[in-house]
Amino acid sequence: MCRHLAYLGPPCSPAELVFDAPHSLLRQSYAPADMRGGGTVNADGFGLAWYGEDGVPVRYRRSTPIWADHDAPGLARSVRAGAFVAAVRNGTEGMPSMEAACAPFTDGRRLFSHNGRITGWPDSVAALAGKLPVTDLLTLDAPTDSALLWALLRERLHAGEDPAAATADLIRRVERAAPGSRLNFLLTDGEVLIGTAWTHALSYRETGGAVVVASEPTDTGAGWVPVPEGHAVVARHGAAHLLPLDTERSQTP
């Protein structure tokens, strides 16, 4: 499965977490410490998206391993942003390896990443997919479970649903349709950051007015808090709180 992380706080360089930390996303791409559900490396592409000075997301994605891209570290070090999302991909068998399949996915100010897989893909979620407008299905970023999940969530956000509530309800619906799916999401609009722990590891840390949410802690320093299974972490303005996604599934923190 993939590895991803997100940051929300005072402007900083994405390179600090993506390339320079002791257990950076770069290191997690080839030496993950808590890779669940199969796979040992994340070599099927990567992506980084941040907010420019005008508040519009800027995205850099490639279908090659992050360690093979010599331009990405310099690009990340040239940027200072108050929010960003980065991901490295370990593609699910049967799904294409292509740049458009790599997170983060974007829509306006929103950035989205999915770490996991939908069991029984694609038959298990055909009914859910069938409720989307045909144009949404025809314009998916890629024929992958992550792109479909983003389309399903995006439709609800366009309808004005609360992001945390929409995320939680989508996870419950997908779990009912495809039991055992791995559904760790990251979602931000630059003001609010939501991360979910559903069958995959996720941790967060609050420090210096910033919140970092990551598949694995990027260092061994103090302050990292595991997100309990079946919970979301919701961060605003440097403070985070936990929210159960399903009262029957969620473990008490």
Image: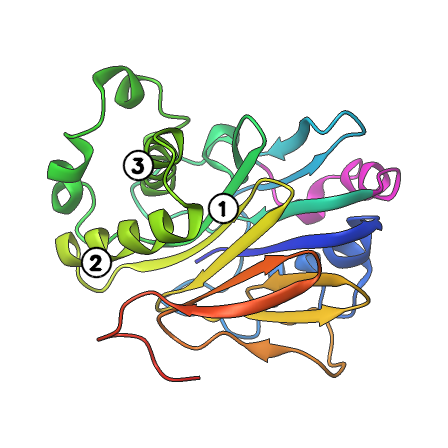
Closer to viewer: mark 1 or mark 3: 3
Q: Position of residue 84 (x, y in %)?
A: 68, 45
Q: Identify whether 125 is placed above or below 199.
A: above
Does residue 86 appear in this view? yes
The residue closer to the viewer here, 3 or 150, is 150
Question: Does the magenta segment cover residue 77?
Answer: yes
The image quadrant that residue 200 belongs to is bottom left
Does residue 202 appear in this view? no
| Label at residue 152 | 3
Task: Answer with left or right where residue 179 lies relative to residue 73.
Answer: left
The residue closer to the viewer here, 136 or 189, is 189
| Label at residue 175 | 2
* Residue under label 1: 113
Between discs 2 and 3, the one toward the N terminus: 3
The residue closer to the viewer here, 50 or 122, is 50
**C-alpha separation, residue under disc 2 versus residue under disc 1:** 18 Å
Q: Which quadrant, please, contains the C terminus?
A: bottom left
The image quadrant that residue 243 belongs to is bottom left
Q: Residues within 10 Å of mark 3 (few under 14, many from 20)?
A: many
* Circle 1: residue type: Ser
Going 74% across and 83% down the picture, which residue do you hit?
Answer: 222
Q: Which residues make up the magenta segment?
A: 64-80
**C-alpha separation, residue under disc 1 versus residue under disc 3:** 13 Å
Q: Position of residue 205 (x, y in %)?
A: 67, 71
| Label at residue 176 | none
